[in-house]
Structure formats: C-alpha cells, structure tokens
Amino acid sequence: MNATTRAHSGRILVIEDDDSTAEEIMAELTSHAFQVDRAGTGNEGLALALDGGYDVITLDRMLPDIDGLSVVGALRARRIQTPVLMISALSDVDERVRGLRAGGDDYLTKPFASDEMAARVEVLLRRHAQAPEPTQLRLRGLVLNRVAHNAFYGDLDLDLKPTEYQLLEFLMRNSGQTLTRTMIFEAVWGYHFDPGTNLIEVHIAGLRKKLEQAGCPPLIQTVRGSGYQFGPA
Amino acid sequence: MPTFDPDRAWLRLPVRSGMRNRPPRLSDDSAAMFSELWRITSFRLTVLYGGLFALAVVCLFVLIYWQTARYQNQQVDQILRNQAHVFSAATVGQLDDDIAYEIARDIRHIGFFGVFAPDGRPLAGNLSRVPHALALDGKPQALPVDRNADLFAQALEVRALGQTLDNGNVLVVARDVALLEQIRQSLLRGCFLIAAVILLLGVLGGVFYSLPAVRHIRGIDRAARRIADGDYSQRLPLGLRNRELDALAQIVNAMLDETERLMGEVKTASDNIAHDLRTPLTRLRASIYRTQQSLEDSSPHHAALDHALTQTDLLLARFRALSRISEIESKRRRAGFSPTPLQPILRKLVGLYEPLASQGEVQLTFRITSDAIVDCDGELLFEAIGNLLDNAIKFTPASGVVRVELDADEAGPVISIADSGPGIPSDQRKSVLQRFYRADEARNVPGSGLGLSLVDAIVRLHGFGFVLDAASEGGVRARVLCRQQRPLR
C-alpha cells in the first residue's frame, strides 16, 4: 500500500515560523494529498484558523509573536474545535501536558519523522470526522463491540485480553491509516516514551495470532519503516 | 566534604566513579551533639584552656598552703623556742609558777608543758609523761599524734620541743597546731570549688562559642549533600563568627559557581549536539523512508533499505534516550509528582511485557504484598520499571524466570525485579549505571547501554534508592526502594 496514492480532501493549516521545518511538513502533507496552507506567525495563523475551513492545524509551540499555547487557547475560547497537533522542541512531559491542557489534541516533539507527523494528522482528521463514535465497529467480518469490550469473527469470540481489545479497537478505529509504534503505545497504554521496537511488535504478533486462530484473514499489515495499518493486504 | 562528583556531568566521560564515598552524616539528635561539639576546634580549645586554668589555680592554692604552713610552723617553733628558753633559765621554784602561769594564760588549751625527773616522773605541768618519739635535742619538731593520743586527745597536729635541763630534769613544751589543719582544709575546699567553677565556665563558654559553629557546619553539611546529589544551585552557607569556615565556604562557593557554569556549558553543548544530530538524522531517515516508499514492492533493495532504516532508528532512539536522561537529570521541579498507587502501574507493566516474555519463553511472575501509594511521577516510574523489566527479559535465557514483586519494608514500598539470567558481577554493578556501559556478557545482546542510566536518573529524581544485587535465581535483582511512602487515605 502506497501512502502517496491515497486521496484526501482535508485542508491543513501549518503554523510554523521555521522555513525548513515548514517546508518539510508541507511536503509530507502534500504528498499525502492534503491541501496545505502555511502561516509564519502566530497572529497570521490565528487569523487564518478563525476564518475556518481547516480540518487540522499543526501548530509550532514557540512562535516569534504569540506563543503556540495562546494560539490554541484563543481558538478554543472562540469555540473553534479544529483538531490541533502541537509541534515543539520541548520534549518534557510537563510541556506535553501543558500543550494538551491548553486545548491541543496531540503533541509531537521535534525533531520528528515526517511520516509520523502525517500519520498523526490523519488520525486527528479521522477522529474529528468520526464523532459520534459508533458502539460497534464492523470490518471484513470482524465485529468489535465497544460496550461489551469484545470482538467476534463470524460467531467466534476472539477471547481478547483487555490490552488486546484496546489494541484492536485503536487499529480498527483508524483502519486504512498508518499507525506508528509510538502512536499505538500512546493510545493503548497511555504513556509517552520510546517503547522500543520489539515491544509493540510482540503485542501485534499476539493479536494477529488470535485473529488467525479465529480463521480471520490477515488484516493487520506492517507498513515498512513506519508501523502498522488495519485493512486488507 | 564531598569531592566534586564528575559523574553528574552530562556525558559522564570517561568513567562514572564507582562507589560514592560519603562522609558519615551528621546526626540530628541532641545525644550526638557533644561528640559533634568535640569535633569543633574552638570548643576543644576553650575546654582545654579551662582545664589548664583550673590546674593553675590548684597549683596556686598548693603554693599558698605550703607557704602558709611554713610560716605557721616557723611562728609556732619560735614560740616553743622562746618558752623553752624562759623555762630553762628559771629556777626550780620559779619554773612551777611560770608553767602554771602559762597554762592559766592559755585559754585556747593549745599549749602543753611538762617537767620530768630523769627517771620520767612528772614534776610539773599538764603532761603526764614524756611524749614518745620526741628527741631531747632542744629543736622544735612535729610529734606523731597517734602514738601520743593519751597526751593530746583533741589535737590533730602537734609540734613539740624537748630538752634536758642543767639539773638533769627534762623539759617538754608542745603546741597544738590544729589551726593549720583548718586552714588546709578550707584552702582545699576553696581550691576544688574554684577549679570546678572554672571548668564549668570553660565548658559553658566553649558550648556558647561553638554552637553557632556546629550549626554552621550542619548547614554546610546539608548543602554539600544536596550538591553531591546533583543540585549545583546550592551554596555553602556563611556563618556570622567563624571567619576560617567562611573563608573556606567562600572558596568552595566560588568553585561551585565555576563548576555550575562549566556544567551548564557542557550540558548546553551536549544538548545542542544531541538535538543538532537528531535533526539531520531525522531528515536522513525521512529520505531513506521516501526512497523506500517510491520502490516497487518487488524491488530487491528493500532489505538494504530496511536495514538502513533500522540502524537510523536505533541511532535516533539513542539520541532520544540521551536527551531524555539529561532532561530528567536537569529536572529540579517535581511538577509531575502526585500520590500514585504502585499496584496498577506494575500490573500494566506486567501486561505490557508479558508477550515479550512469552516470546522469549521466559516465565513472568507477579506478586504483590503491598498496596502502597507513593508520591511520584507515575509516567517516569513506569518508564524506569519498564526498562528494568525489559532488561530482565532480554537477558534471561529461554525457560528462565523473571519475578516482579511489590513489597514493603519499614522504610517504604520496594519494587523488586529478579531474573534467572547470567547476572551482573558485583564489581560491575555500579558501572552498569554509566551511560553506554555494557557488561561483557551483554555484548551480544542488542541494546544501547542507556537503559539503566535512565532508570538511575529517574530514581534519583524521586529520591528513591536503587540497588542491584544477585537474585536467588542466579541473575540480577534490581530493587527500587520507594522511601517516601504516604499513608493510605
């Protein structure tokens, strides 16, 4: 599956003062078929965002005029709920908490892998479009009951452990999207550090095995160099 | 005084010092106060001078006593000689009268007189016999009172003079010198009293003079310990009186200023290096990634690019870990701290690592005997224990065991992770906390050698203890001693 071939109708606003970073973000997002605008300062970004029409905003935490936290705060104060991906050189956990508390929806630390950034933007876009979330997810014969926290393939209970259920839920909710290991770790376990490559891999392997035992076709794909994706091979 | 501890510097180059030699902690209880006071020079000097002065006073009193006694004896002896002279010059008839007169005149009953026939028969006076041990040489002498108790019942000390008269009779004059004894006793009493007062004043003065010094030294001790624990913003306190200590403290403070400045520079430089290297590395990774994306799925170059990506990711992970360690180490705030129950964290961790363990055919067991709540940054603690678990599983061969336990001892909850792997030789247990250190046995196991440094940094931030020793299973037992337990509410 090649990411560049997929079509998006999303409009993204990139608020970033550093030219090379902005170019990098824009190049990556454009290659994912997004329509991208850029604002070089906080005020300009705020004005553009207030005009509306954007599906996701990437926001640099440190801007020359007004702080990124203030930008997101001003947006939320005006009831503009456009998802915001905060991008910052400050990796401190406290900074992340502050960014999310101010109204950011996700937080990415510089320097970042651009595919990870794009993956996060896609997840934000999907999450925003998807609400309200259904109580049942059905994909290719796989049924995920989000009330009973179980999953069936046909009539067969997959008998998932809580973590396996959460993992499958995250994958299914974002089906068709590339999810990096860090994103999976953050979403399923709720922690924000580097889990190492092996750890998520064995959990995915376990889940794949359960799906396979139920006779389910392989639905969890490995995306080369990035992570995983739920969907047909 | 803790020495400058280079292992706090950002990159711990070249080797982190092994054992931390700490001076014994100054005790806080007042019982140990005296021994502590005794270590203060001014106190010791004051007490020493007090003792010397008391000794001088004793000497002075001895001298006064000795002089007084000599003078007194001379006086008495003169009286005895005079009386003997008068009596020996008198005629027999006169002698009786003279003696009777002297006795009558002696209202204090301290004079004794006797005239004895050559055969020892008493002829006149108030003595019934010639005193024992009296030499009849006409010279005043001290008489042994104990041998003449019948003659001088009340007397304590007697001086006497005996002489043979021209007619062959024996003349004895004696005098009770009890006064001298009284003087001696009162002198001795005074002497001891004054010596005691001087000593007491010396000790009190010493305490009064030295207590600020003790407090000052305690302040220095506290500050020095914080500095040794990595808080380089601490400075040694200056006292009010102790100029020598202050001079030293100022020198040390100046040294600390310089150290802090240099460390700040090193840290900034290292952080910049880590950051500046991460940025191009990230770009490198991006271009490898994009190249791979543009390849056909059947392309033979995928394996090579996969390898390049893996290596770049590894490098990036190491830089991230380095930055993370320095970030945690430079953390002064405890913003993320809150009372956190340990049990859910450990359960989550065991769940997270369970598949990794079963993949390596390692049995992961979990035992909890405590439901402790600890003031900590739950996320950081999760990361630290996760690293320990990761290590334990990684180094334990197939069909081995990794044991996770949460206990509590009197000092607080203890998280223990033991494995049946090869273990760490005791001489390497400190070195494994160094950045990039890899035990010889670990060379063929993938890893960065940063995991335990990260654990160490997190544990230090919390003020917890971190102990590596041998597990009963033969491998490593890593224990995090959470010594800040809060009672359950």
Image (cartoon, coloured by chain):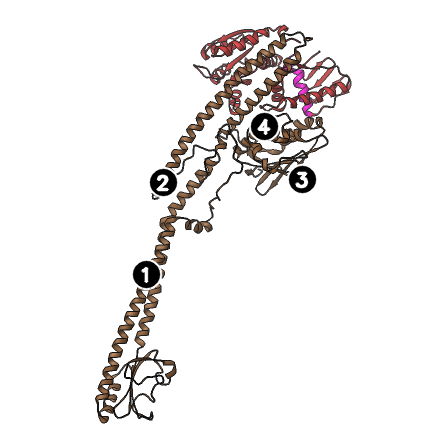
Chain colours: A red, B brown
Dot 2 or dot 1: first in sequence order is 1
Can you tell which mark lies on residue B449?
4
Residue A129 appears in which quarter of the rendering?
top right
Q: Which mark is residue B128?
A: none
Q: Are marks 4 and 1 in contact (CB under 8 Å)?
A: no
Residue B131 appears in the picture as rendered: yes
Point out the stretch of residues depicted in magenta. A162-178
Label whose residue precedes the other's in the sequence (1 or 3): 1
What residue did someone put label 2 on?
Answer: B246
Closer to the chain start, of discs 4 and 1, is 1
> Sequence order check: which comes first, mark 3 or mark 4?
4
Pointer 2 indicates a residue of which chain? B
Front tag of 4 and 2: 4
Classify residue B104 as left or right of residue B363: left
**Quadrant (top left/top right/bottom left/bottom right) for the N terminus of chain B:** top left
Q: Residues within 10 Å of mark 2 (few under 14, many from 20)?
A: some
Please state the horizontal and vertical placement of residue B29, each as a whole percent of the image. Answer: 47, 48
Disc 1 is placed on an element classified as helix
Residue A164: where, in percent of width, then height? 69, 23
Q: What is the quadrant of residue A187 in the picture?
A: top right
Q: Quadrant of residue B392?
A: top right
Tell which subunit mark 1 falls on.
B
Disc 1 with disc 3 on a shared chain: yes
Residue at the image position 26 percent from the left and 76 percent from the top: B74
Q: Amino acid at mark 1?
A: Ala
